[in-house]
Image (tube, rainbow, N blue to C red):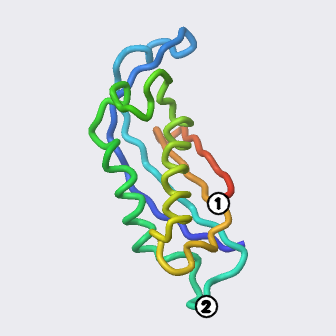
Amino acid sequence: MYAVEVRDHIMIAHSFRGDVFGPAQALHGATFVVDVAFYRDDLTEDGIVVDIGRAHEALKATLAPLNYTNLDEHPAFAGRNSTTEVVAKHIFDAMAEAARSGALGPGGDGIGRIRVTLGESHVARAWFEGPVSS
């Protein structure tokens, strides 16, 4: 299995509903380091997993609507807690669509799996990983 990973970050604000979240029920900020790994069994004819430049551009386009926003007010998270896990799945869905739609360039359609990892601090991270199905 081959993989390529790209990285960016976002700065967000949000709050959570539910006693399990303790003080995080109050509005607070977070800076997420976002890593997206693209996996495939074999390399393309050009010897790559995916065009790294296009992958990074797709990630930046996915993150732009989230950056410097209060996720409590973002339609994608209406009625639900924007936990690190939920945000990871949101980003995964967009990156999987980028692979399916050709936005990752030639060979992007051969991506079998994607893993999105959000580092929320130096001691905690969460991720969502799944197949890129059509």
Q: Measuring from the top left, give residue 49's x and y in whole percent.
A: 58, 77
The amino acid type, in three-letter code, at marker 1 is Ser
Q: Measuring from the top left, give residue 92's x and y in whole percent.
A: 54, 50
Mark 1 sits on what residue? 134
Residue at disc 2, secondary structure: loop
The answer to which image quadrant residue 23 occupies is top left
Residue at disc 1, secondary structure: loop
Is residue 112 toward the left or the right of residue 89 in the image? right
Residue 123: image tag: none
| Image position of 56 with respect to 89: above or below | below
Quadrant of the frame with the C terminus: bottom right
| Image position of 103 with respect to 62: above or below | below
Observer-side mark, 2 or 1, equals 1
Is residue 74 toward the left or the right of residue 92 in the image? left
Q: Residue at x 61, y 58 (%)?
A: 114
Q: Residue furthest bottom?
A: 45
The answer to which image quadrant residue 125 occupies is top right
Q: Residue at x 61, y 46 (%)?
A: 128
Of residues 70 and 100, the one nearer the viewer is 100
Mark 2 sits on what residue? 45
Of residues 69 and 77, the one nearer the viewer is 77
Badge 1: few (under 14), some or many (20 or more) residues near its Cα, within 10 Å?
few
| Image position of 101 with respect to 31: above or below | below
Of residues 78 and 27, the one nearer the viewer is 78
| Image position of 89 with respect to 96: above or below | above
Quadrant of the frame with the N terminus: bottom right
- What is the spatial separation of the Cα atoms under label 2 and label 1, in whole angstroms? 22 Å
Q: Measuring from the top left, give residue 110's x and y in whole percent.
A: 63, 74
Q: Residue furthest top?
A: 19
